[in-house]
Image (spheres, rainbow, N blue to C red):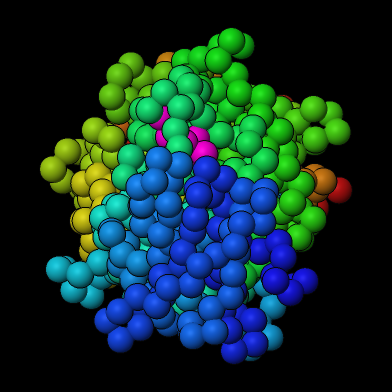
């Protein structure tokens, strides 16, 4: 083996030949079978004596499929795909494919978007844009809508998992092969083209990855024939730590398995120029019972692996966004590693969608306090360590529905549903945190989130005003008009909480002053107020920059007529508030 191929795993081009290397410590022999003219050409791999097997085939070429034939300790043989295969012929029971790694990025730079300026859009490739109802969407059909997302103000797309699935449609959270991109989406080349197209528009790409379990059908199960207690073998814990509700948990304490996961992180960030990773259910990595577990079921190896993943990503580029979904609210996830933390940049704030529903009296008792608590909640006192959203693939599924569907079931485009959806997202886009939209919520997509119901793009015309409202909100959030700088800051002061009338108001600022200080007033009530009074924390003349009840967003909205307000000598203002109405105000000019 030449020096350059000594430490790789998988298949690699070496001149005109192809080198193969696989980890199978309990195998007694390993042969690579390369498909040629409907036959398999065999090359016996040599044992390196450390559990690895390697060799070179002079007759293999990119595009050909291959498998490993492993002779197990008891003399039987099993055929396995390459755990490091960059592509499969088909997702289910296919063969590994030799890929040519060359790709022309056309010198496209990766966008660098600071956390406080990120607007994330959660996208499921299979349902996002499907020109044909009978066929899943692809990276190429998704590319067709990138101009729309750019005009909306989105600058980060979070792709739900794109690795090969056990069946060709699904959410992607039951990983079978970590290194191969789902064929029905357009495969490896489709993802490369998608990322390049995003980068050309200044949009970054975050990829959802799953390391807490494998699908129950994974070929990694008893990969080289060995297992302990009839469990998963070399890639898995062979005791109760291997159990999850969805499939086997990898053995994070085994160096080769750690490397397998770390190499996967490296692949996404270097070969595909991915700008960030969202690690699914890290709580199920670091505790064998997930959020139901305690100290005694913690998995310390997983915690150190999470740290190693963050270190590796930030070494590749300090601009990589590492996001965890932890379900625990544990601040140590986003604490620096030198303080005992895992070193992640942000984690999902899982409380906001429920708090905003409670405030809107959806599914339970109307509650003001939970929303105030959520708005003030941060990890480690850092406003941008939290991803904030009204809906996600989780909250809009699993027996639940999208927020607008919950507002008026069976009529998700009703005036109430539009008011509720706009109010929820206006709060989300004016709160500290990194805002995230679930695909389609900006144009009132109905029902729940699932892996087959495609987005109804006609709704972008039907609800063009609601799309416009989201464009305005995102513009204000990013301070593109130069008069709401405070929304790019992390500071919030909830200075008014009227529990009886369900009105909340808060002050947002970066440094303070004209065009920086922002006041947000939200009425979560079906009652209109001709003259609602409140005391502002800052005196002066205030201009309304956004009014969610404006008829330009929906002709059937009951618009409140308010454009400017000025405080009296006790900083009091009186203004008209429409039902389910949110106003964003900033100072007209410096009051000094």
Specify whether 420 is left or right of 202: left
On the rendered image, what quadrant is the N terminus found in? bottom right
Q: Residue at x 67, y 48 (%)?
A: 50
Residue 114 position, x and y percent, is 72, 57
Image quarter for residue 14?
Answer: bottom right
Above or below: residue 560 compared with residue 80 = above
Question: Would you say residue 529 sits in the magenta stretch?
Answer: no
From this viewpoint, is residue 455 visible?
no
Residue 443 position, x and y percent, is 32, 59
Numbered disc total? 0
Q: Residue at x 67, y 51 (%)?
A: 49
The residue nearer to you, when weighing 251 against 554, is: 251
Numbered range of the magenta stretch:
231-236
Specify whether 176 is left or right of 299: left
Q: Main secondary structure of the magenta part?
A: loop
Specify whether 144 is left or right of 563: left
The residue nearer to you, when weighing 230 against 408, is: 230
Residue 20 position, x and y percent, is 56, 68
Above or below: residue 434 compared with residue 300 = below
Above or below: residue 147 compared with residue 10 = below
Above or below: residue 485 compared with residue 31 = above
The residue nearer to you, when weighing 314 against 592, is: 314
Residue 531 position, x and y percent, is 46, 33
Name the outermost residue toward the front: 75
From this viewpoint, is residue 15 visible?
yes
The residue nearer to you, when weighing 203 against 419, is: 203
Q: Residue at x 59, y 62 (%)?
A: 46
Image quarter for residue 45?
Answer: bottom right
Image quarter for residue 17?
Answer: bottom right
Q: Residue at x 73, y 42 (%)?
A: 308
């Amino acid at each position: 083996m030449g020096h350059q191929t000594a430490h790789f795993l998988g298949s690699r081009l070496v001149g005109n030949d192809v080198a193969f290397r696989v980890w199978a410590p309990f195998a007694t022999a390993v042969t690579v079978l390369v498909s040629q003219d409907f036959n398999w050409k065999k090359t016996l791999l040599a044992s390196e004596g450390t559990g690895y097997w390697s060799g070179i085939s002079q007759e293999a070429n990119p595009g050909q499929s291959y498998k490993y034939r492993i002779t197990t300790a008891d003399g039987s043989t099993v055929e396995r795909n390459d755990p490091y295969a960059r592509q499969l012929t088909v997702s289910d029971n296919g063969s590994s494919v030799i890929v040519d790694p060359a790709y022309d990025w056309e010198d496209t730079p990766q966008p660098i978007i600071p956390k406080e300026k990120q607007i994330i859009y959660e996208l499921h490739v299979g349902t996002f844009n499907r020109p044909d109802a009978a066929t899943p969407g692809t990276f190429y059909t998704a590319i067709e809508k990138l101009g729309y997302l750019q005009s909306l103000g989105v600058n980060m797309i979070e792709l739900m998992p794109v690795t090969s699935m056990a069946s060709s449609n699904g959410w992607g959270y039951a990983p079978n092969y970590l290194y191969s991109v789902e064929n029905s989406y357009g495969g490896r080349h489709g993802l490369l083209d998608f990322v390049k197209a995003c980068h050309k528009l200044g949009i970054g790409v975050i990829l959802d990855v799953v390391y807490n379990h494998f699908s129950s059908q994974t070929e990694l199960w008893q990969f080289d024939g060995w297992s302990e207690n009839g469990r998963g073998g070399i890639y898995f814990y062979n005791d109760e730590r291997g159990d999850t509700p969805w499939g086997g948990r990898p053995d994070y304490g085994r160096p080769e398995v750690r490397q397998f996961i770390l190499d996967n992180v490296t692949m996404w960030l270097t070969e595909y120029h991915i700008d960030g990773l969202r690690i699914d259910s890290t709580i199920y990595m670091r505790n064998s019972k997930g959020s139901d577990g305690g100290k005694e079921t913690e998995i310390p190896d997983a915690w150190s692996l999470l740290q190693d993943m963050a270190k590796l990503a930030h070494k590749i580029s300090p601009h990589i966004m590492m996001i965890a979904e932890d379900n625990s609210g544990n601040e140590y996830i986003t604490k620096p590693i030198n303080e005992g933390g895992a070193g992640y940049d942000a984690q999902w704030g899982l409380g906001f969608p429920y708090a905003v529903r409670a405030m809107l009296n959806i599914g339970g008792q109307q509650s003001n306090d939970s929303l105030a608590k959520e708005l003030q909640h941060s990890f480690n006192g850092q406003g941008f360590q939290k991803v904030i959203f009204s809906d996600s693939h989780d909250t809009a599924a699993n027996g639940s529905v999208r927020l607008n569907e919950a507002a008026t079931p069976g009529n998700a485009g009703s005036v109430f549903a539009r008011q509720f959806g706009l109010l929820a997202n206006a709060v989300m886009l004016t709160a500290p945190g990194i805002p995230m939209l679930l695909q389609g919520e900006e144009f009132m997509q109905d029902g729940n989130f699932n892996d087959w119901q495609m987005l109804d793009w006609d709704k972008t015309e039907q609800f063009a005003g609601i799309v416009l409202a989201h464009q305005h909100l995102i513009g204000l959030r990013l301070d593109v008009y130069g008069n709401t700088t405070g929304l790019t800051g992390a500071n919030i002061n909830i200075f008014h909480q009227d529990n009886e009338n369900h009105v909340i108001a808060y002050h947002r600022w970066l440094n303070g002053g004209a065009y920086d200080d922002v006041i947000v007033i939200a009425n979560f009530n079906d009652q209109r107020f001709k003259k609602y009074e409140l005391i502002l924390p800052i005196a002066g003349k205030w201009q309304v920059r956004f009014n969610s009840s404006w008829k330009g967003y929906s002709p059937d909205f009951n618009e409140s007529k308010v454009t400017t307000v000025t405080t009296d000598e006790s900083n009091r203002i009186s203004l008209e508030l429409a039902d389910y109405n949110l106003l964003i105000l900033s100072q007209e000019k410096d009051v000094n």
